[in-house]
Amino acid sequence: MPEQPDIPSTLEEFRNSEQVVDPPVVAVSSPIEPEIWPRYGNNCLVFFPTTNEDKIVPFHNHFKNTKPDDVGILYFLNIPVPDHGVPQPYNEEGPKAAERRAKDAKRLLEQNYPNYREHHRIGPTYIAVVESAYQIDGVDRPVDYATISIYDALTGKVVTAISKGVTLNPWFVEEARSQGFTNGNKNCGVMTPGAVLAKTIKGVDAQKWHEDACGKARREILDDAIKDMPMPQGKCKSS
């Protein structure tokens, strides 16, 4: 790495060198095609198109805290989905990637768990999505943030929130972008700036660098954004 004074090269230099900022974009909610799935009972399924615990745990807490009395058991299911060759979305590609995750999750639920809803007497069915992206257009410094969406799989309705963001030294973003883009789309990076961070600075985690950077863990940032989100129909209702 070039020895430039404004680029941190050690964990000590990196710590608290960045800051938490307000959401860099406005939330936009686009409904998805509803599924004509039977309502087998009053239990509720929430499935996540990820295995990343930092993205899942805040949703677990949110659904447990907001579950109405007429809903029975809450079931949670993690369904990893492909990233379509876009491990790092930028700008408007973030919300698009979130929608792709939701659609992929519905398809994989049907393919890999065809009897799950019937076996567990599921009625209400939700897809909870967190898609991280960088906003680099219209900001003074690159901002890592998340598009957070809750989709009602049976109605297609959705609610979306944008988390607060964490700034990052432009050098790490530029280095990641120098590795190329999927199909030439400059909003679809093939390497994450987090990966560059982990490679450059010993002791920094590629996915959990936020706490070192600004003193606040990514899970905490996501929890702050998720805890007050409404449900697509007000709350999780039984069939």
Image: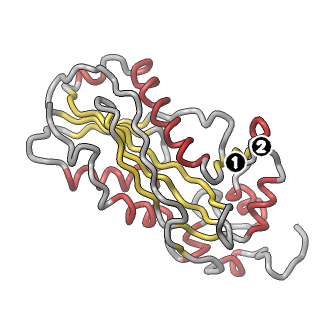
Please state which of residues 102 and 40 is positioned toward the viewer in this rendering.
Answer: 102
Label 2: element kind: loop
Q: Which mark is residue 187?
A: 1
Residue at far right of view: 2
Q: Is residue 6 above or below residue 155?
A: below
Q: In the shown orientation, is residue 96 left or right of residue 159?
A: right
- Judged by depth in the image, the label closer to the viewer, 2 or 1, is 1
Please state which of residues 225 and 119 is positioned toward the viewer in this rendering.
Answer: 225
Q: Amino acid at mark 1?
A: Asn
Q: Residues within 10 Å of mark 2 (few under 14, many from 20)?
A: many
Q: Is residue 159 above or below residue 31?
A: below
Q: Residue at image x 44%, y 51%?
A: 148
Label 1: element kind: loop
Residue at far left of view: 70
**Residue 120 at what x, y percent from top left?**
22, 26
In the rendered image, which quarter contains the C terminus?
top left
- C-beta proximity under 8 Å, tags 2 and 1: yes
**Of the image marks 2 and 1, the number of the one nearer the N terminus:** 2
Q: Residue at image x 72%, y 63%?
A: 197
Q: Is residue 132 above or below residue 71?
A: below
Q: Which mark is residue 181?
A: 2
Q: In the shown orientation, is residue 189 left or right of residue 106?
A: right
**Residue 115 at what x, y percent from top left?**
31, 17
